[in-house]
Amino acid sequence: MLDVRNIYKTFNPGTINEKTALAGVSLNLEDGDFVTVIGGNGAGKSTLLNAVAGTWFVDEGQILIDGVNVTKLPEHKRAAYLGRVFQDPMTGTAATMEIQENLALAERRGKVRLLRPGITKQERAEYRELLTMLGLGLENRMTAKVGLLSGGQRQALTLLMATLQKPKLLLLDEHTAALDPKTAAKVLEITDLIVNRDHLTTLMITHNMKDAITHGNRLIMMNEGKIILDIRGEEKKKLTVPDLLDQFEKVSGEQFSNDSALLG
């Protein structure tokens, strides 16, 4: 479903601020894979996700989504294949619009607009059923403005909106980093529910080693713009944070120094 072939990305080339963010990264996700990506600050994980999303073009290499070469497609055209949830709960929703209106916008994205009443009775019933699944009581607040929701409620709604049309690939960009631990755990629970229910191919960037180990069927660790660990299956199920740190040190020859990842 995702095929990343030997991609490179350097920022500010030829200047004193030159930084190689991706150095020959190759990655293949099969249909239904849920891959978590962990790494220290500057490891390249967010750059990888943004490269896949088309936020910026890569310098070399190719990116294919479901067999389609999207390497040269701009972000707005690539969005047809993708669902994305950002780190900031304020991103991805329209704060001044109702919950049901936000869902209607997400459902109709990319479709031909017709002259008809706003939200039909059938659509409203569908939205209520979807919101009930979240377990946050939002099904009883469908006419409430999204700006009145808490960060966790808003992030859960954004997740629902990003997956409403069942994207080829779901990108989760540290989508729980701005939430308190209890709320983050709830959003991750909802994430697992939606991903498993719809069999979505998912790439989740996280700053939390424990979350990277707990969620998904595969874990990737990045360092200095490269993938240095790729752990899956039974090996991942048995993995612990100390195990992961030990493997990182063996492969990289250095100690992992991102406190937020360790303590999160």
Image (cartoon, helix red, strand yellow):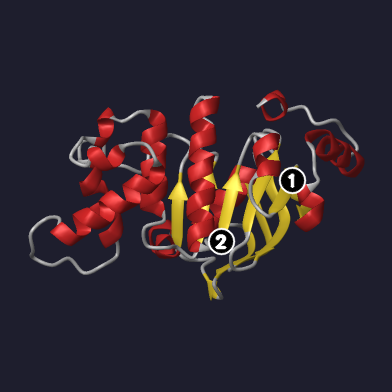
Q: Is residue 158 above or below residue 83?
A: above
Q: Position of residue 79 (x, y in %)?
A: 41, 60
Q: Position of residue 111 (x, y in %)?
A: 26, 67
Residue at (48, 30) in percent of width and height:
183
Using a 10 Å C-alpha cutoff, classify the residue at mark 1 as few (fewer than 14 neighbours), some (14 to 19) or many (20 or more).
many
Q: Is residue 126 left or right of residue 143?
A: right
Disc 1 marks a residue whose amino acid type is Met
Residue at (8, 65) in percent of width and height:
115
Residue extending farthest bottom: 67
Residue at (77, 50) in percent of width and height:
236
- Which residue is at the front of the view, 27 or 35? 35
For the C terminus, the image quarter is: top right
Nearest to viewer (mark 2 / mark 1): 2
Asked if one can make out residue 56 in the rendered structure from this viewpoint, the answer is no
For the N terminus, the image quarter is: bottom right
Q: Secondary structure at mark 2?
A: loop
Instruction: Give yes or no for contact between labels 2 and 1 (Cβ–Cβ under 8 Å).
Output: no
Q: Is residue 113 above or below residue 136?
A: below
Disc 2 designates what residue? 201
Using a 10 Å C-alpha cutoff, classify the residue at mark 2 as few (fewer than 14 neighbours), some (14 to 19) or many (20 or more).
many
Q: Is residue 88 above or below residue 104?
A: above
Give the mark nearer the N terminus: 2 vs 1. 2
Disc 1 designates what residue? 221
Disc 2 marks a residue whose amino acid type is Thr
Q: Measure the alpha-carbon separation of dots 2 and 1.
A: 18 Å
Q: Position of residue 253 (x, y in %)?
A: 91, 38
